[in-house]
Image (cartoon, helix red, strand yellow):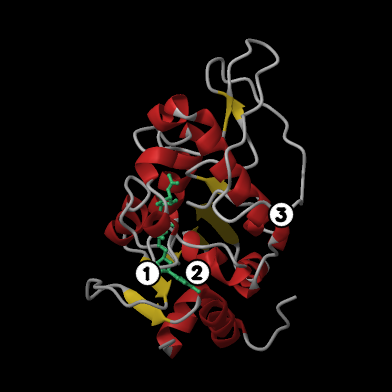
């Protein structure tokens, strides 16, 4: 429930952090990783798709799967939650968006300077020399779950081009992680939206913010345990974000 005191804390905040996970893109038709039945890791084995060893063992299987996801994202549109988050920037002095998502729906909704802790589907690079590679913006529908597609080759060293996402066992991009840590340390309100909060180090951010005295709010349709100092808004991201904006800042169109 959005209490008047929570709305007031948001209204008076100087720096708000919005930290998002796969749940914020669900209403755009992008599946999460861990939801029973619909989560990607229920249907596909991360060990086969989300490690560099897996890519080297079977580049076409892995590349085909990520091309399917990139294609799904290209066909998706930002939803009410992405739009409300972009809108929030108009009401608070400083807003920092930190996401675990590898889609670009925050940017397409109008958010600026989004820190992508887990990289991006849209920034592939050579697996050997790391040279960036430009992919065509295809919108051709690919079969569910993908099929084998031979990855492109690097123009400099002929190595395979790999997806620009962070795989298990890899470091987070330094700039994004430093921005996340700095914002969590400085903010007065931290909104954690649509994440299971179990993948570290990203999941440290709400804890760091809480440790520095920020008001931490979780938005999720599936309830989980939180400490007595945190807040939980139970419901889909779009509904809860739009209600939160309305309670804190009054009626406004989310466009
Ligand atoms: P998860 O799949 O672990 O969690 C998604 C969360 O979204 C769950 O808690 C759902 O209850 C919630 N959810 C579902 N529908 C929602 C809705 N309409 N509104 C709000 N929340 C909703 O996804 P992440 O927490 O993002 O890493 O996973 C973290 C990382 O694990 C991902 O970035 C990815 C994955 O392995 C990499 O690819 C490196």
Q: Is residue 112 above or below residue 129?
A: below
In the depicted structure, whether residue 219 falls above or below residue 119: below
Of residues 224 and 210, the one nearer the viewer is 224
The numbered mark at residue 141 is 3
**Along the viewing direction, whichever of 183 and 78 lies nearer the viewer:** 78
- Do labels 3 and 2 touch, CB within 8 Å? no
Q: Depth-wise, is mark 2 or mark 1 nearer the camera? A: 1
Q: How many circles with numbers are drawn on the protein?
A: 3
Q: Report the residue at 55% width, 44% height from top.
A: 65
Q: Do the CB atoms of the residues marked 3 and 1 lie less than 8 Å apart? A: no
Disc 1 crowd, CA 10 A, few/some/many (<14, 14-19, 20+): many
Q: Is residue 246 left or right of residue 181?
A: right
Residue 150 in picture, x, y percent from top left: 62, 30
- Crowdedness near tag 2: few (<14), some (14–19) or many (≥20) residues, C-alpha within 10 Å: many
| Residue depicted at x 40% and y 68% | 37
Label 1 sits on a secondary structure element that is strand
From the image, tell me which residue sits under label 1: 215
Q: Residue 173, percent across and down?
A: 48, 34
**Which corner quadrant of the image does residue 38 belong to?**
bottom left
| Front-lying residue, 68 or 109 | 68
Q: Which mark is residue 13?
A: 2
Q: Is mark 3 within 8 Å of ligand 1?
A: no
Report the Cα–Cα distance between label 3 and label 1.
42 Å
The secondary element bearing badge 3 is classed as loop
- Ligand 1 location (quadrant): bottom left
């Amino acid at each position: 429930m959005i209490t008047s005191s929570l709305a007031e804390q948001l209204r008076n905040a100087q720096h708000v952090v919005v930290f998002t996970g796969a749940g914020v893109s669900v209403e755009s038709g992008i599946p999460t990783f861990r939801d029973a039945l619909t989560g990607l890791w229920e249907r596909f084995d991360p060990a086969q798709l989300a490690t560099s060893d897996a890519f080297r063992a079977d580049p076409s299987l892995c590349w085909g799967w990520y091309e399917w996801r990139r294609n799904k994202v290209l066909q998706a549109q930002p939803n009410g939650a992405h739009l409300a988050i972009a809108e929030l920037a108009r009401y608070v002095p400083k807003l920092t968006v930190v996401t675990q998502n590898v889609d670009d729906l925050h940017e397409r909704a109008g958010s600026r300077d989004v820190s992508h802790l887990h990289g991006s589907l849209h920034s592939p690079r050579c697996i050997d020399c790391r040279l960036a590679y430009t992919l065509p913006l295809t919108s051709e529908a690919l079969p569910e779950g993908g099929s084998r597609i031979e990855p492109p080759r690097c123009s400099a060293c002929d190595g395979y081009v790999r997806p620009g996402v962070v795989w298990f066992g890899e470091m987070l991009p330094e700039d994004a992680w430093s921005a996340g840590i700095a914002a969590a340390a400085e903010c007065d309100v931290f909104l954690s939206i649509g994440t299971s909060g179990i993948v570290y180090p990203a999941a440290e951010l709400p804890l760091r913010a809480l440790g520095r005295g920020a008001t931490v709010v979780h938005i999720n349709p599936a309830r989980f345990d939180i400490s007595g100092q945190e807040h939980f808004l139970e419901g889909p991201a779009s509904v809860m974000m739009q209600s939160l904006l309305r309670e804190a800042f009054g009626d406004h169109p989310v466009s």
